[in-house]
Amino acid sequence: MTLKNQKMIYKVILMICLTMLACMYIYPVFLMFMNSFKPFGEIIANVLAFPSKLDLSNYIYVFNKMKYLRLFRNNVIITVIGIVGIIIFSSMAAYILDRRRGKYSSVAYALIITPMLIPFQTIMLTLLKSMNTLHLSGSKIGLGVQYWGFGIPMATFIFYNFMKTIPIEIDESAKIDGASTFTIYIKIIFPLLKSVTVTVIVLDVMWIWNDFLLPLLMVNTSNETKTLVLAAYTFIGQMNTKWNYALTAMVMAIVPSIIIFILLQKYIVEGVVAGAVKG
């Protein structure tokens, strides 16, 4: 057997293994979508069977019951606030830390990314107390701001590694022309961060939009502040669970983030590879 044939066999085996692995992850999601078209009786009878007919009554009921448009707006507000803060502060921090390297900047960088190693469960009670003291709990703006603290460490790590690929000579040339540090960042550096910025946006949108624990702790149960994922959880009870409505609500909650991921997924690879390989 030639070396070329061996490589071809390895590629085929690898493709089969990856396909099987992908199916393992996709199948539960497929079941969720499929069962969202079933009435409660069909789900209980056989969760693996296809629906007897394409019935949209679950979606109509959940759309009205959840007040979907209002909750969708809540999700958008919280996600936008979180993303904007994460992008601005993490990219600025990465720029300064990379351009002003030294003992103190290394310590600052270590302190910024260290929270990635701290489990959320260890600080959630302290965080809840702090947010109550600052009157930021129970509001969409307060919840969006809290995502800054959890998202900035990872975003700074990604931006910092990508920043190493931008020559410092660009800054020096701009300074000779009289540009300030802030002007250089806004007009020169930030536009060059397009691919990695989109990467951070997509990753954090997937996280913030579908997050459950932090909204459960920080916002109340009224439709004024709760998110789509929290609303989906209301169909799940201790004694009785309306699985047809719960699955439908979950589909309606996660579909927007899936669409964003599909449309922008190529930028994730570009941004991560650029920062990891060139940095």
Image: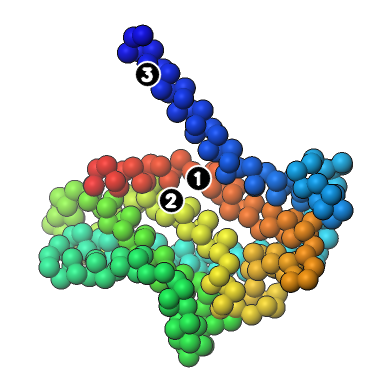
State the image coordinates of residue 118 (x, y, percent, origin top left).
37, 69
Residue farthest bottom in this picture: 133
Q: Residues within 10 Å of mark 2 (few under 14, many from 20)?
A: some
Q: Nearer the viewer, residue 120 or 214?
A: 120
All told, the count of numbered labels is 3
SS type, badge 2: helix
Disc 3 marks a residue whose amino acid type is Lys
Q: CA distance from mark 2 to mark 3?
A: 35 Å
Up-down relation of residue 149 to residue 22 (above or below) = below
Up-down relation of residue 207 to residue 131 (above or below) = above
User: Residue tagged by mark 1?
Assistant: 264
Mark with earlier residue (2, 3): 3
8 sits to left or right of 164: right
Q: Nearer the viewer, residue 19 or 70?
A: 19
CB under 8 Å between discs 2 and 1: yes
Q: Quadrant of residue 51?
A: top right
